[in-house]
């Protein structure tokens, strides 16, 4: 069974996420959200939180979740291949201390979460951002495996 490595850059915690961790009943919602995230308006996730992203076509994406006031809460990097620049970008653009080594990315495919300053002001969001990140990684990288 395929897996995606899931790492939190601020803490260095790593786990493997499997496709059966994504509820198949939300497949079409995730597909719509994936499309909207990369539009200029982004997409609403829940309770006024929004997500906007940018793609490295065929290789990966960066998605940032914002709170109701537009403050970044978490940035999610999704990479399909080891040669992706996503890991480097996550480390170059941080304003918070990270535990991970910018020269040593995890084995791809991976999803990397970087907590932003807004995480401190939105602790309730920390109860669902990891799940959101995992779902976005699966719908972005291997949508057929969660269908």
Image (cartoon, rainbow, N blue to C red):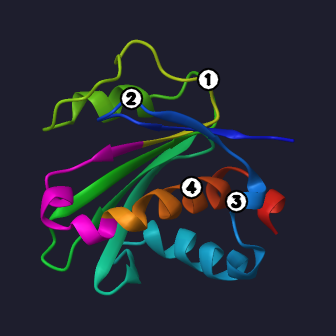
Label ID, residue 21: 3
Task: Determine the CA span between mark 2 and mark 3.
Answer: 21 Å
Query: Magenta stretch?
Result: 113-125
Of residues 38 and 127, the one nearer the viewer is: 127
Q: Residues within 10 Å of mark 3 (few under 14, many from 20)?
A: few
Is disc 2 placed on a helix, strand or loop? loop
Of residues 6 and 70, the one nearer the viewer is: 6
Upstream in sequence: badge 4 or badge 2: 2
Q: Horizontal and vertical percent for residue 106?
A: 54, 23
Is disc 3 placed on a helix, strand or loop? helix
**Can you say which quadrant of the picture contains the C terminus?**
bottom right
Viewer-nearest of discs 1 and 2: 2
Is disc 4 placed on a helix, strand or loop? helix
As drawn, which residue projects farthest toward the bottom?
47
- Could you tell me if the residues under marks 4 and 2 are in contact, i.e. CB atoms within 8 Å? no
The residue identified by callout 4 is 134
Upstream in sequence: badge 3 or badge 1: 3
The residue identified by callout 1 is 107
Say if 72 sits above or below 5 in the image. Answer: below
The residue identified by callout 2 is 12
Say if 6 sits above or below 55 in the image. Answer: above
In which quarter of the view is residue 126 placed? bottom left
């Amino acid at each position: 069974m395929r897996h995606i490595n899931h790492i939190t850059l601020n803490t260095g915690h790593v786990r493997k996420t499997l496709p059966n961790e994504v509820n198949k009943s939300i497949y079409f919602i995730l597909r719509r959200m994936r499309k909207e995230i990369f539009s200029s308006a982004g997409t609403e996730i829940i309770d006024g939180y929004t997500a906007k992203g940018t793609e490295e076509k065929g290789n990966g994406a960066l998605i940032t979740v914002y709170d109701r006031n537009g403050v970044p809460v978490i940035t999610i990097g999704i990479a399909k291949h080891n040669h992706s620049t996503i890991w480097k970008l996550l480390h170059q653009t941080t304003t918070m201390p990270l535990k991970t080594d910018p020269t040593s990315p995890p084995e791809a495919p991976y999803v990397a979460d970087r907590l932003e300053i807004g995480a401190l002001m939105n602790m309730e969001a920390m109860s669902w951002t990891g799940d959101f990140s995992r779902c976005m990684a699966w719908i972005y990288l291997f949508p057929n495996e969660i269908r």
